[in-house]
Structures are given as C-alpha cells and as structure tokens.
Amino acid sequence: MENKEIYDFLIVGAGLYGSVMAHELNKAGYKVLIVDKRNHVGGNVYTEYRDNIDVHIYGAHIFHTSSKQIWDYVNSFVPFNNFVNQVLAFYKGQYYHLPFNMYTFNEIWGVKTKDEAIKKIEEEKSKENIKEITNLEQQAISLVGRTIFEKLIKGYTEKQWNNKCENLPPFIIKRIPLRFEYNNNYFNDIYQGIPIGGYTNLINKLIEGIDINLNTDFLKNKQNLTKIAKFIIYSGPIDEYFDYQLGALEYRSLTFDLEKINKEFYQHNCVINYTDSDVKFTRIIEHKYFENDKSDVTWITKEYPTDYSLGKERYYPINDDKNNKLYEEYIKLAEKEKNILFSGRLGKYKYYDMDDVIQLAFDDLKKFNIVID
C-alpha cells in the first residue's frame, strides 16, 4: 500500500479503544489514519444487521459502567437502551438464576431468607474441611460450598479452560459475588445498556470523517506504514509486534456457531449458560433480545471455548506468573521503541470491560495533552 500523505497519528486497530483514540485526536486537530487487518470496523464489538436484528458477531457485549462520564460520553454518539443482563444457567434439565442470589439459593436448597442461605453455604463449607487452598476447586468450594460448585461452576469452568478445576490455579476465581437478595441483574454497575442500532453504529460515529484502511495488516506493511505517520498507536498483540522473539503469550480462544432459526424465538432468555460438562458449548445467546428487535426469525450463537494457537483470535489472556513475566519482558522491548504507544487489550495483555477500554483511552490521551471533561 502506498500513501504519500503524512499523518500525525497512525492507529493500529479499529476496535473501541482505537476508535476513541482516533476520534479525540482528530477532534483536537491532528490528522489520523486507522488501519485494521479485518474487513470491518469495531473489533470484537462489531455488530451486523441481519433480518432486522443487530447480531453481535463476536459474542455478547453488554455495556455497563458506574462512570457517569463514560456513560454520557458513549450516549453522546448513539443513544443506549436500558437492557439489563439477567443470565440463566441450565444444568441437567433445571434452570438456575445468575449471578448467585436468593433466587439461586431458593432453586438449589429451597431456602427463602438470607440467614437460611448463609447457613446452608457455611454447612457445606465446613464439611469440606479445607485447610489450604491450592487449586480452583478448593477456592470455589471454600466460597460457596460443593453444591453450587458442582452444578454451576465446575462444568462451565472446565470447558472454559479445557482443564480440570483441581488442576487450575485458584486465582482464576479470586472471589465469587454472592447476593443475599432477590436480584437477577448480572452487573452491579449503575448504567447498563446496548447502543441502539448496534455497536457498529457507535464505532462509525466515533470514526466519522477519519481515514481508514481495512484489510490492512500493519505488521506485514510496517516498513511503509511507519513512514507516513509521526506517531504510532498500536493496539495489536505486543508479542506479535516483536515477532515472538521472546516467545508467544498464551490466551484462550473462542469459536462462535452463529445460526439463523426460522421461528420468532429460540429460547426464553437472552443469555443461557450451560454448566453441564456433557454440553460442549458454554452458552447460547439470542441476539434479538438486546434491542427488543422485531423479526419473524431469530439469530443465536453457541459459544465454544477453544485452545489458542497462533492465527486464532485472542480472547482471554492467561495472566499466570509465567505469562505475566513474559509480558514484562516485552514491555522492556517496547520501551526502547521510538514514537509508538502500545496499549489496548492486546497491547496491555489484559482483559478489559468496555468501559475500562474507554477509560484506558482517556488516560492515554493525556499523554498527548488531551483531557476528556
């Protein structure tokens, strides 16, 4: 690709982070170019309009935050609805409410009050007599007891990580939120919703008027692309930037089985987790619930956790000691690079919620003397 025009900033990645950075830099008067190796904008929040339904191509994305600043910011581009995520778990023919709350405890033990629920959990924990926590199974049981662990945590977690809970480190479940009230709202944040018209609508508003080249792999064209911009903002994988010279950072990946169903509804809830290990997928998402879309057909996604290998999409970083140490070594290499900022989910090797991605962009913009009011 040849482009003789000089840009102030070249932003690698047209996801939420890159789009916010591009918008604010452009707004401040800088000339910006975005490149992305995919054939669409939006990264993993990309939505596609099918049969009057905004389909979340890379799995469910529900925006939630307690920051009024961030909520007002995204709503200044696209109005958000008031969708509340209320998840169900399905285990051996029975539905349970998530996150763990009084509805869940009633469904599992028949208890009706907070004191009864606490007593049942404490009884189960005391039976285990766990002296030292060395794995995820012990960690989970020490928090919620064996019944909840067996029905609602074990199978789902082992599918997610492709390993037995007894072999997984306890840090994966540092804590498990327990609500001793009848409250099915999956998130505790004050603000929650979905952008009307889908996330692609939000991204398009953010990058409106900004030059963008899709189907463009920055790393394969790095020699030419770095010549046309004064500064690079790189939100791609940090290990890939350095050609994996220290080794590859590890991730878990996902496979999405997206299917059109020729009836009005497939299931009676937007998100249903399948916690039985005999069911290979972890959850089914029915997309029309996100915006209450009206259609005679429906679209669903079955989500399968998969092992990561080079070339697959990176979803969940494995932030154990080995990988975190390797990441720190890559940071040392990054610090030697001139006129480039490594950031975003893949540049930071960290899982971020969407509001945290925007906050990260706000923080990074301060490096260029741009402060978001």
Image (cartoon, helix red, strand yellow):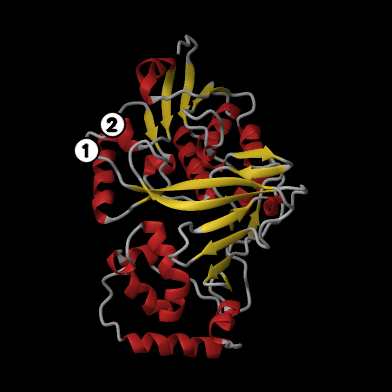
- CB within 8 Å, label 1 to label 2: yes
38 and 357: which one is in front? 38
Q: Does residue 53 appear left or right of residue 44 in this picture?
A: right
Q: Residue at x 30, y 34 (%)?
A: 334
Dot 2 falls on a residue whose secondary structure is loop
Residue 176, label in figure: none
Dot 1 falls on a residue whose secondary structure is loop
Residue 173: percent from the left, percent from the top? 39, 66
Tally of numbered tags:
2
Residue corresponding to mark 1: 246
Residue 164: percent from the left, percent from the top? 32, 65
Residue 242, label in figure: 2
Q: Which amino acid does label 1 sit on?
A: Leu
280 and 246: which one is in front? 280
Q: Which amino acid does label 2 sit on?
A: Phe
Question: Does any portion of residue 67 appear in the rendered image?
Answer: no
Picture quadrant where residue 313 is located: top left
Mark 1 nearby-residue class (10 Å; few <14, some 14–19, many ≥20) = few
Q: Which residue is drawn at 59% across and 83% down?
A: 106
Picture quadrant where residue 51 is located: top right
Residue 323's place in the image compared with 35, above or below, is: below
Task: Give the quadrant of the N terminus.
Answer: top left
> What's the CA distance linking mark 1 and mark 2?
8 Å
Residue 304: percent from the left, percent from the top? 46, 52
Residue 202: percent from the left, percent from the top? 64, 39
Residue 207's place in the image compared with 45, above or below, is: above
Q: Which residue is drawn at 37% across and 37% down?
A: 237
